[in-house]
Image: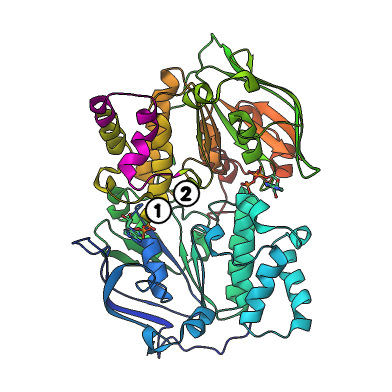
Amino acid sequence: MNHKPYNETIQPLIQVNNFSLWYENNESPVLNNLTFSIYSNQIALLMGTSGSGKSSLALCLNGIYPEAVEGISSGDIYFEGNHITNYAKGELSQNIGIVFQDPESQFCMLTVEDELAFTLENRKVPSKEMPDRIKKILQLMKMESYMKRELQELSGGEKQKIALAAVLLLEPKLIILDEPTANLDPISSLEFINLVHQIKQETNTAFFIIDHQSDDWLPILHRLLVLGKNGTLMANGKPNEIFQDTIMEKEGIFLPKKYQEPYPFDKRLIKQEQRIIYSFEHVSFNYKGIGVLHDINLELFQGEMVAIVGQNGAGKSTLLQLMSGLLIPDSGEVTFYNKPLGAWKENELRSKIGFVFQNPEHQFITDTVYDEISFSMRLNGISDELINHNVLKLLDQFNLTHLQHANPFSLSGGQKRRLSVATMLDEEPSLLLLDEPTFGQDAHNTREMLAILLQLLESGTSIVMITHDMDLADFADRILVLDQQRLCFSGTPDELWMQQDIISKARLRLPYRMEKQCRVGEQHDFVY
Ligand SMILES: Nc1ncnc2c1ncn2[C@@H]1O[C@H](COP(=O)(O)OP(=O)(O)OP(=O)(O)O)[C@@H](O)[C@H]1O
Ligand SMILES: Nc1ncnc2c1ncn2[C@@H]1O[C@H](COP(=O)(O)OP(=O)(O)OP(=O)(O)O)[C@@H](O)[C@H]1O
């Protein structure tokens, strides 16, 4: 990438002046009179509670909103001194690249190679140069072997890596990344942050990042912007100064862990009497002849919380789908309450096992948040009065009351995730399977969700959750590690943190409490 040096003392790359955005039918603006600048060769991080308007702002900065939604705006956004409405659509999107919060929604082609070639075509790169460039970017993302793969068959993290590769290929002057590491395994996440740093060092590219977790960005960050709940810009300045202010904590935004421990809950005391509710015996599974899980043996106990961890593509979501009965193993036995999974009636199984998909949109079926939560209660013939009581309680617990009439698809990423969990708690399931439950949540909502999960555990529900958050995994009673198609570890968090070889092979990291111990006496905040 070789952009012309841009002199920030003369002009910022992006200038936002008194900008507000309203969604149709909403009296108050979602973005409220924002004024700030983005400079070339700088990395800026935007934080804010779930629903504060971060993704909306990202989509306004490159001119997609308000046109693409039913909304109106006031105020101005300038790119290199020209009003963004003066640019042709294609011209702006070549200068300002964006990776959406849900990368899946921005793919245009069927395969990885075609998607990346499409980006290069937009940049008018001669076709004979394309194979080399595609190969190089895939090497950089450690995805060389994925060239011919179909996008819809990739795992969540693999899709995110391809979307990130595409925006890097575009070589725009500003790259906007909406929660770019949310689906990446801990080491891929660090590697990507290093790559952003390297690109910034070698080119003049500006980065505008949205993330609920700031820890790993801190060493390379120039500026922090914070959106308040009312859509105003609460802070804009040096990260370390803003983090020392109390505004972040009051708003319920995650502080870096060195300012605040990640989860303020004590570890649970594991109950002694343990009844096995679920078992896998010699289970194997393949997609189109390619093995994903091989000879998996495991048991789940009543009331226990299990975390599944492992690198992107290790088979975690596949394992969860096998547990829920959505996928059928090629071989082996799956037993739930001593009965083969296949012998359960579908409706009985669905009322006993709650399953929260990795992508919450995959499970929405109604037009309002309220109907989404009440849907299966209605199927089960529960009285209207009881349904209303239960729905209002769940809306309140998941901080969604003000959105009960909203369309589930119009929610923010974090709100969608909370709704997807709430819909599974309409009746207390015996087993709750969660694919990355805290993904996209702010501090306040993460703690609330964890408190709800703890209550469920106390009442006997077993919980299995996939997570890339090692602090959350540390909180579980037991951790399962998947690697190379096999279950390579099952034990307590403390047992896992002693196994350096497994941690590095499965591309995991230590949780903060352990990293902190390792760092005693070190000068730097973080060691890559
Ligand atoms: N198309 C839309 N129509 C109506 N309301 C919307 C639309 N898109 C978003 N909203 C609402 O605007 C608010 C801001 O949403 P946005 O996605 O920008 O928040 P966010 O800060 O990115 O949240 P998160 O951290 O949860 O991803 C939310 O309350 C959301 O429900
Ligand atoms: N429908 C499918 N057809 C073919 N291959 C698939 C399909 N779904 C997943 N895979 C492949 O199976 C492997 C395991 O996918 P899975 O989604 O279970 O991984 P994961 O551990 O959950 O990954 P991530 O952490 O990225 O979400 C991946 O390499 C993926 O590309």
Q: Quadrant of ligand 1?
A: bottom left
Among all residues in the image, which is located at the extreme right?
289
Q: Residues within 10 Å of mark 2 (few under 14, many from 20)?
A: some
First in sequence, mark 1 or 2: give its number: 2
Relative side of 340 to 11, left or right: right
Q: Identify residue type, mark 2.
A: Glu
Q: Position of residue 320 (x, y in %)?
A: 61, 34
Q: Is residue 266 magenta?
A: no
Q: Is residue 133 above or below residue 139?
A: below
Frontmost residue, 263 versus 465: 465
Relative side of 128 to 188, left or right: right
Q: Is residue 379 above or below residue 421?
A: above
Label disc, if present, on residue 361 of the rendered structure: 2
Q: Is residue 380 magenta?
A: yes
The residue wearing badge 1 is 409
Quadrant of the snapshot with the C terminus: bottom right
Q: Position of residue 433 (x, y in %)?
A: 53, 32
Q: Position of residue 151 (x, y in %)?
A: 66, 58
Frontmost residue, 335 versus 459: 335
Among all residues in the image, which is located at the extreme left?
27
Q: Is residue 187 above or below residue 39?
A: above
Q: Residue at x 36, y 42 (%)?
A: 445
Q: Residue at x 73, y 86 (%)?
A: 126
Identify the magenta region: 364-388
Q: Main secondary structure of the magenta part?
A: helix
